[in-house]
Structure formats: structure tokens, C-alpha cells
Amino acid sequence: MHCKKIKNKDMNFDVIVIGSGPGGYVAAIRAAQLGLKTAVVEKAELGGVCLNWGCIPTKALLKSAQVFEYINHASDYGINVSEAKHDFPAVIKRSRGVAEGMSKGIQFLMKKNKIEVITGFGKLIAKGQVSVDNEGKKETYSAKHIILATGARERQLPNLPIDGKKIVGYHEAMVLPTQPKKMVVVGSGAIGMEFAYFYNAMGTEVTVVEFMPNIVPNEDIDVSKELEKIYKKKGMTIMTNSSVEAVDTKGTGCKVSVKTAKGMETIECDVVLSAVGIQTNLENIGLETLGIKTEKGKVVVDDYYQTNVPGVYAIGDIVDGPALAHVASAEGIICVEKIAGQHVAPLDYGNIPGCTYTWPEIASVGYTEAKAKEAGYDIKVGKFPFSASGKASAAGAKEGFVKVIFDAKYGEFLGAHMIGANVTEMIAGVVTARKLETTGHEMIKTVHPHPTMSEAVMEACAAAYGEVIHL
Ligand SMILES: Cc1cc2nc3c(=O)[nH]c(=O)nc-3n(C[C@H](O)[C@H](O)[C@H](O)COP(=O)(O)OP(=O)(O)OC[C@H]3O[C@@H](n4cnc5c(N)ncnc54)[C@H](O)[C@@H]3O)c2cc1C
């Protein structure tokens, strides 16, 4: 008689990570590299928001929009193209395909690193114990170290409840079945502006409503002003110092009531995109059971991401700090290296680059001019416009600039703010320079290749010291 051999399922691990976003999967891979027996619990697609509903699919949509814009401006480059048309469902399909491919890549990496993937909703039930509910089937796993990386979702405002059809969040905005003729985007942070750019470039009439006095309010004021100027030129309506008070979704479209400095205005549109920030996924994961401390909707952790309960850690969007994929990943790596007993330095939150992938792109790191002054620095500021860059002229991408800020006394590189074509690929140079404590004079003496957009960084540094050549 043949007996079917049943493989014993592993229930005990060194590390269990709940959530497979860029925080979770990177922490798991690093843990496995360090020889720790590791499992990841995931209730949805591997790769989290970033790969499936955030960073990657939006960049695929934005690429389609850029290609469309390029083709529409082909004659600027001496190329004749008869009328360009886009196929909206095909654009969405391409973006979903890119996301799917990335998620499969994580599946491969899990296998390659011998990481157990446990499907279902994970919850802490006791110290060192995680219960996983997979459609009602519950199993308990144990681990010496449990890392929470459950990420975040759309924040909802009471007067802007997401219904998924007329008032949408980023999930729906990424997969709308038809292109809206008119759209109101509420919130002008990176997510809001990326969608505003995408839909505007595809031919939707877009209005952006921002509560603060400037769009992309976290950026340096010069960058905000430049983006507003460029977007207005592209035909977008920008309403700052304004707030959406109510949306009437009765009838065929939406009537959006906006409070402005001059009084109430009503804007009619097909779809309203709520892009007003995120809310952490902390419900039902067992925080209360173990008495894990939270503050303002975030899990409280030490420099190495341990919570107040030894053996339980939290990383990514659910802890304080910028809600960015590269931050989540860096936190995951530091967390497990510390668990493995390595000597590791805490993350320098002052040197985190932030990028917005509109066209032109925005990239920044460190202090804005206002923040540097607020912090009491005596500063030197240099600015170099891409209109004076040979590469930008050749590329037909003369919009934008690089702005740099130095401490006047010691030459410390306090911050850099860029808006222009491909600047998101340039900011890492400044991050590296700042990591290596490079001074203004060292930046000026660092030879940059010609012709490149990156020369603008060197020239901006030279401008700060009165040594600029091409202005
Ligand atoms: C539209 C959009 C665009 C973005 N673009 C960028 C960008 O260009 N660059 C950038 O740096 N950042 C971007 N972000 C932010 C980035 O996606 C997040 O900062 C990042 O994904 C956070 O990673 P995380 O590991 O904390 O969690 P997430 O990526 O949110 O992943 C959490 C995972 O945990 C799972 N999960 C939650 N609870 C449980 C549970 N109890 N059991 C099992 N699984 C669970 C979820 O299903 C999810 O897969 C964007 C976000 C959005 C929404």
C-alpha cells in the first residue's frame, strides 16, 4: 500500500513579518540573508500598496501620459505625426500588467530566499504568537520576533466619503473603467498631483483643490510656484487656500462645493478624487491584546523599530516618519540587522529624498529655504534654471531649476530642491553627497559630465558661492 507523505508544515520561525509591502518583504529578505528562519503573512497581493496600488502602477500610468504628451508635441522635434489617440482601457491594462509582473517578482524572491509565505490576515494573539485567518481557516504560528508592516490606506474626510464610483480614492483612480471628462482632485500632495498630471495629460479637464496656500505644500515654495505656473499653462485649474465642503452626487455627475477666500464656488465634474493623505492599518491586529503603544494613529517604536513590547517591532507607514516605500525598506533592513545582533546605525530621517513623478518631476532632500531659516541657519542659496542647460535645451525640457541651500558658516549641504525632466534620477547624487558630509566647495569641484541635466546641481552650488559659469 502506498502512503501519501504529508510534508510537515513549519509553524515556528525566528521572524514573522505581517504585511508584504516594501517594508515587510525587504525585512523578510534581509532576515533570510542573515540566516533567520522567516515567514511573511499577507492577506492580499505580495508587494503591498507600493507594487500593486502605489509607486509602480502610477508610474506606468504616468509613462503613458508622457508618451502621449511627447507624441502630441512631436512637431517640436521636427517629427510629423498624424493625430495621436490614446486607448484609455489599454493604458490601465498596461499599468495593471506592470504591477502584476512586479508582484510575481516578489513571489520569486520569497522562494529564492526560502521565505515561507502564509496567506491570510495576521493578528498578534500573544507574545511570540500570530494567528492567521485565511477565509475562516485559522492557524497559529510562533516566532521569536514579530514585525508588523501592515501599511496604510486612503484617509477619508467626513464630507468626502469614498463611494468608489463618483468619489474615488487612489485604488479606483488607477482603474477607472472610462476616462472622466472633468475631474476634481482634492489634495495636492504627491499622489494628488501625479493623478492630476496623468488625467490632464490624457485630456481630462482637471481642477485641483488645496487647503494650503501652495500646491505640493511640503516642497520648497519656489518649487510649488513653478509647478503651479507649469500646470496652469497645461490648462489645469488650481485652487489654493480652498477646501471642499460637500459633494452632491445625486444625478449624473457631481457638484462640488468649494470654500474659497472669495466665498463658495460650485464645480461640476464626473469624478472627485480624494487624495487627502493616508490612514494606518492598525485595526484588529492584536495591538490591544499585547498593550502595544500607539500615538496619533502610529505605532510607537524605538530607534530600531522595537515597540514597548520586546520581540514585537513595527516598520513602514505604520510608524512615524515619511510614508514612502524607500523609508519602509530602510527601516525593515535596520530592524532585522539589529535583531540579528549587528551593529547598525539608526536611520537618518533628515536625509530622505522625496520625489513626485509628475512631468516635470520634483525631487528634494533636506531643508527647504524656509525650514533652514526657521532652524536658525545663516544660509547661502544657489539656483540654476534648466533654461540655461545645454542638455535641457537639446531635450526640449527647459522648464524648472535646481535650488541648493548651504550653511554659510561651515558649508554644510542643507538641502536641494529640483523641478524638471528626470530630476528624480538626479537627487540620489545629493543624498550621497549629504551622507558623506560634502561641503559646497567640494560640490563645485566635483566634475559633472557634459551635457547632462545633472550639471545644474554643480552650477546651482557654484551660484550659491558666486562662482556660477553659465548664468
Ligand atoms: C498612489 C500611491 C502612489 C505612491 N507612490 C509612491 C512613490 O512613488 N514612491 C514612494 O516611495 N512611495 C509611494 N507611495 C507610498 C508607498 O506605497 C508606501 O509608503 C509603502 O507602500 C509603505 O510600505 P509598507 O511596507 O509600510 O506597507 P504597504 O505597502 O502598505 O503594505 C502593507 C501590506 O500589508 C498587508 N496587510 C495589512 N494588514 C495585514 C494583516 N493583518 N495581515 C496580513 N497582511 C496584512 C496589506 O495587504 C499590504 O499588502 C505611494 C502610495 C500610493 C497610495
Image (cartoon, grey):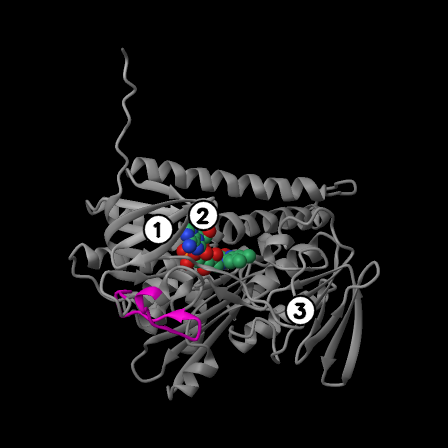
* Ligand 1 within 8 Å of the CB at mark 2: yes
Q: Which residue is mark 3?
A: 160
Gap between marks 1 and 3 measured at Cα: 35 Å
Left or right of residue 220: residue 412: left
Mark toward the start of the polypeptide (1 vs 3): 1
Q: Magenta residues?
A: 289-306
- Residue 417 horizontal/vertical position (percent): 48, 70
User: Looking at the image, which residue sits at the far top?
Assistant: 1
What is the quadrant of residue 46 in the picture? top left
Q: Quadrant of the N terminus?
A: top left
As helix, strand or loop, the secondary structure at mark 3 comes to loop
Q: Crowding at label 2, few (<14), some or many (≥20) Cα neighbours within 10 Å?
A: some
Q: Is residue 294 magenta?
A: yes
Q: Which residue is mark 2?
A: 43
Name the kind of residue labelled 2 in the image: Lys
Judge whether residue 304 can be spotted in this image: yes
Mark toward the start of the polypeptide (2 vs 3): 2
Q: Is residue 30 magenta?
A: no
Q: Which residue is mark 1?
A: 131
- CB atoms of marks 1 and 3 within 8 Å: no
Judge whether residue 453 can be spotted in this image: no
- Residue 224 horizontal/vertical position (percent): 58, 73
- CB atoms of marks 2 and 3 within 8 Å: no
User: Looking at the image, which residue sits at the far front?
Assistant: 1
Q: Nearer the viewer, mark 1 or mark 2?
A: 1
374 lies above or below 432: below
As helix, strand or loop, the secondary structure at mark 2 comes to loop
